Image: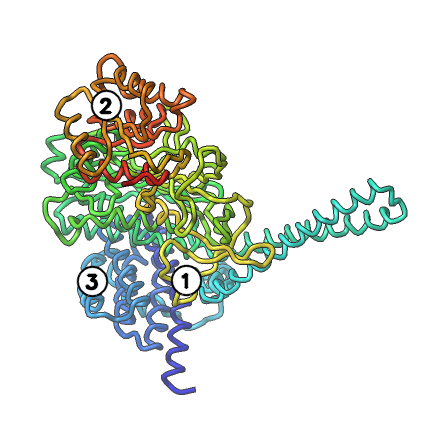
Amino acid sequence: MSNEQMMQELLEVFRVEAVELFDQLATQMARIGDQSGDDLRASARAAMRLSHNLKGSSSAVGLDALARLAHQLESALAPLCHADTQPPPSVADVLLAAVVTAQRLGESGESPELLREAQEIGPRLVEATAGLGGRVEATEAISHPTPTKPTGERAAARRQPSDEFALDQAAAAYVRVPTERLDALAGHLDELLAVQGQLGDQHETLRRTLAELEGLGAVSTAPWLEGFVAAHRKSHSTLSRLVSNVTATLQRIRTVPLASVAPQWRRVVRDCARSLGKDVQLQVRVGEAEIDKHVLDQLRDAMVHLLRNAVDHGIEPADERYLCGKPKSGTISLAAQMAGAHVLIEITDDGRGLEPDQVAQAAIARGLVSPEQVAGMSEEDKLDLVFRDGFSTAASVTAISGRGVGLAAVREDIARLQGSYAIESSGPGEGTTVRIRVPISVIATRGLLVRVNRTVYVLPIEAVERTLRTTGSRIRTIDGSPVLTLGERDTIPLMWMPGSDGARIPSDTTLDVVVLTFGVDRVGLLVDEVIDEQECVTRRLPWNLQRVPGVNGVVVRHDGSVAVALDVQYLLNQAGRGRREPVVQDRAQDPSRPTRILVVDDALTSRTLARNILATAGYEVDAAVNGAQAWDYLQKNEFDLLVTDVQMPEMDGLELTRRVRSSSSLKDLPVILVTSRGCQSDIQLGAAAGADEYLVKGQFDHEKLLQAVERHLFAKGDAP
């Protein structure tokens, strides 16, 4: 082995060891900030010994900058080993900052930026702890006196292990294992789960066979087979229990306490507040909450974004807080608790809060939504706009905010972890709360297996609101997008998997729909079959396939075949962007007759405009001034399409549509509603009445009307 290979191996060993050292250091530093007397001195000695070990280990692998910082940290801790009173908060802050910098040096290497940071924090360490309990050199604090023969009480005291020795004993109780080896072990779980599923299927087959034999009166065979089936059932139960235990144990091995990253969160808040000239305190209450290291790594950036956002956009400047009667110092609270197989994280600030209408106006100003779309939004929907890509309320771009990517990235990170989020605010000046729910571990999760054509897909069960069976007659098109109507106030956007054959669906066809949700987003995925729910371990795709859009990996099924694990966030983003062809096909038409359209509108200008657009496109067009006249025309003439306004005298468009749908001869006539009322409740009323499409005049143009007409006539082959 060459010297370079040996050094590389030593460096890998060091990094495994350093993870434990940094976790223990962060724990001791947090205690130092809240202790006094004997407890303070014990924590300081423990932290000092850890710093000494870090100095020796980092020096051995050539990380000189880290070794120097560890030595400075060791020296700064020496006075605290003789202190009596609780140190001021500034001491705990600088100690935690030094640990975070040291951890970054150990993980990321000695970049110029980190080297400058390490050089700046050394003098701050000395200055912060000077005079606390008297200056004592690090070597003096950890030196051992010349052994003498102990007597009396002194001998009894010497028999008690020192804090440093106890710390070494605790460290010796651990075996350091690289994360890659744990990942490899987790990779075998899907094979165990597949075998478990196969045994379960075999047991069910045996049970049915036994029942058939008993039904045929095969008495001589049944006793032997009963014993075999019972033994098989016991083996399957034993394997299931063992797989469950292995999964739970592996999850516990991979989990780390959330408290171990609290110093980094405090550093983020402190640095952000300092750069903005604000006074902000972070309160962390995570208790004994633990989380898989893989989950924590993916959640790290999201937490940083949320904390920086709370400092920048949430906490007001000191003069503004004074005018509002608030303390000069703002407070951000970060709390976490275990909830079954999930961890709930809540970040709350006592800042200016969010006003739903102001959020909506900011989104409109940036072109993320239209005024018509906002008109139909609930307060929850409006607040959720802050998680849209491109949203920002900042007047200018700074190093902290203004580009509109931070919270959108948070949304993507949480979706990737198959978690959920929610945001709420009691109003202006009342602060904001963001709640995150993520799984403790992603080693084994439950998934719903569905089939589209010949491909089997896996959807995370956490994102599945429900599954349902419906018919093509309940599918409508609103502003070019297919939706499923479940009631007067419930419409769900629909989508097909790319490549599926679902463009034209007869109204009497039975359909399987999986309703997926994330945040306030909701979509119905049309599938050919809902197969089953199963425990899944998602395997990553090969390196050359990892950028396949919408795919997280693959899952091995119980029969050994492979299912594709889908990215729900990708599906929700694609909802409404896919097919624009008509979704329901029923009527056929005599090709010798020209296509005839009835336009209904009480406004002369709108009626004339729609009539001219359609006539110019080659359609034969009749016009009516209200629903009553249109109904009379429909009784006397045959039309291929009805385009109607909603608000009209005598009979409005909704009533006209309901009459069309209740008529045995007209029930399949395509109906397009064209109206200026674009709020969600009005759109849902149109869908409930039976309209095939809903066009909003504020979004209306010539091309959009023609496209809508062609969508519904194309299904019958009527387009000119």
Label 2 vs label 3: CA separation? Answer: 75 Å
Q: Earlier in the sequence, mark 1 or mark 2?
A: 1
Closer to the camera in the image, 339 or 503: 503
Asked if the residue at tag 3 contacts the one at tag 2, i.e. Cβ–Cβ closer than 8 Å, the answer is no
Label 1 vs label 3: CA separation? Answer: 23 Å
Determine which quarter of the picture holds residue 603: top left
* Name of the residue lying farthest toward the right: 220
Q: Earlier in the sequence, mark 1 or mark 3?
A: 1
Give the position of the N terminus as an image quadrant: bottom left
- Judging from the image, what secondary structure is the residue with disc 1 in? helix
Q: Is residue 544 visible?
A: yes
Please tell me the numbered disc located at residue 44: none
Query: Label 3: which residue?
Result: 121
Please tell me the numbered disc located at residue 600: 2
Determine which quarter of the picture holds residue 51: bottom left
Above or below 452: residue 469: above
Above or below 565: residue 596: above
Q: Position of residue 685 (x, y in %)?
A: 32, 24
Q: Position of residue 138 (x, y in %)?
A: 30, 67
Residue drawn at point x = 23 percent, y = 43 percent: 310
Q: Position of residue 278 (x, y in %)?
A: 15, 45
Query: Label 1: which residue?
Result: 20
Query: Which-is-in-front pick, marks 1 and 3?
Result: 1
Q: Earlier in the sequence, mark 2 or mark 3?
A: 3
Above or below 358: residue 202: below
Query: Which-is-in-front pick, marks 2 and 3?
Result: 2
Crowd band around label 2 with a 10 angstrom C-alpha radius: few (<14), some (14–19), many (20+): many
Task: Indicate the amino acid at tag 3.
Answer: Ile
Task: Indicate the amino acid at tag 2.
Answer: Val
Determine which quarter of the picture holds residue 630: top left
Q: Is residue 379 visible?
A: no
Residue drawn at point x = 28 percent, y = 25 percent: 682
